[in-house]
Amino acid sequence: MSLRYRLIATDLDGTLLRDDDTVSQRTRDALAAATAAGAAHIIVTGRAVPWTRHILDDLGYEGLAVCGQGAQVYHAGEHRLLTSLTLDRQLARLALSKIEAEVGPLALAASRDGLDGEVLVGPGYRVQEGPLPVVAYEDPAELWSAPLNKVYIQHQELDDDALTSVARATVGSLVNVVMAGAGIVEMLPLGLSKATGLSLAARRLGLRAADTIAFGDMPNDIPMFGWAAHGVAMANAHEELKAVAHEITASNDHDGIAVVLERLLG
C-alpha cells in the first residue's frame, strides 16, 4: 500500500475533530493506515499549545504539531515547544487603536506565550462554551504584561467577516488578521500563517510542499492550501476556503478526511 502524499496536514476544529470534539474511529484508522504506508501526519491548528495538548495526548499523537496559527511548533511526544513566535505588543496596541478609530470599541482576549500560556479574556468578550480554560481580567494593563502569541478581537455589531475585512484594510501592514472560526478573529505577527509554521515543521521531517495534502475548514487555512500541493476543504468549510480548494470532501462529522485518505490508499 502506497500513498501519493508523504505529508498529511490536518486542521483540528471543524476538520479532524467532529463537532463533539472527538475523532472518529474511521478517521483514526485512515490516518493510521496512511502513516503505516509511510506518510507523516502533522496537526496544524489555530489553538495555542495549552489548548491543544490534551487533544494530542488523547489521540496518542506523538509527532509535531503546528499551533497558534503557525506561531508554535510543538513536539507532542516530548511535550516540548520547539519554536515560538510572539506578537510585538507595542505594534498590537497601535493596531487596536487604529481599528477602534474605525469601528468603535472592541472586546479583547489574548493568548500568552509558552507551554502553559494562559488565555486572558477581557470585559464583554464572548467565550465559546467548553472545557478550555480562560482567565478573566479587568485591568487593561494586564493584557500586555507578558509575551503574547495573538490577540483576539470581537465587535458588538460587526460579524466576523465584516470585522476581519475592516481590520485587514486598516492595519494589514502592521499585523496579520485572520478569521479562524465563529467569533474568532485574531491579530498575529505580520507574515505569520499556518503555511509558515507548517513549512518549518515539514523541513524538520525532510518534507516539502510538493509532498503535502492539507485539510481545513476556515479562511485561516487558505495560506496552508496555497503552500500544499493539494488542499481539501470540508463540506462544512467557509466559502472563502472552498473557493481555493482543489477538492471538497464530506464534513468533519462525516469522516471527510477518511473519505479522501481511503481513496488515495486504494
Image: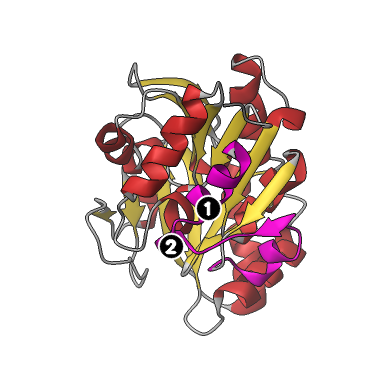
- The picture places residue 55, in percent across and down from the top left corner, at 30, 41
185 left or right, relative to 130: right
Instruction: Name the residue rendered at 58%, 44% in the picture.
Output: 90
Q: Is residue 145 visible?
A: no
State which quarter of the image contains the C terminus: top right
**Residue 204 left/right relative to 73:** right
Q: Position of residue 140 (x, y in %)?
A: 38, 56
Other residues around mark 2 within 10 Å, as few (<14) / some (14–19) / many (≥20): some
Quadrant location of the N terminus in the rendered image: top right
* 1 and 2 marks in contact (CB < 8 Å): yes
Q: Nearer the viewer, residue 236 or 186?
A: 236
**Residue 19 in magenta stretch:** no
Residue type beneath disc 2: His
Residue 253 lies in the magenta stretch: yes
Q: Is residue 203 above or below residue 190?
A: above
| Residue on which the image places disc 2 | 254
Look at the numbered disc 1 and give the secondary structure of its residue: helix
Q: Which residues are magenta?
A: 236-265
Residue that badge 1 annotates: 259
Q: Amino acid at mark 1?
A: Val
| Number of other residues with Cα within 10 Å of mark 1, as a class: few under 14, some 14 to 19, many 20 or more | some
Colour logic: secondary structure
Q: Nearer the viewer, residue 195 or 171?
A: 195
The answer to whether residue 194 is left or right of residue 253 is right
Element at badge 2?
helix
- Residue 66: image location, x then y, percent: 51, 34
Residue 5 higher or lower than 216, as above or below: above
Residue at left offset 58%, top offset 49%: 260
Disc on the earlier residue, 1 or 2: 2
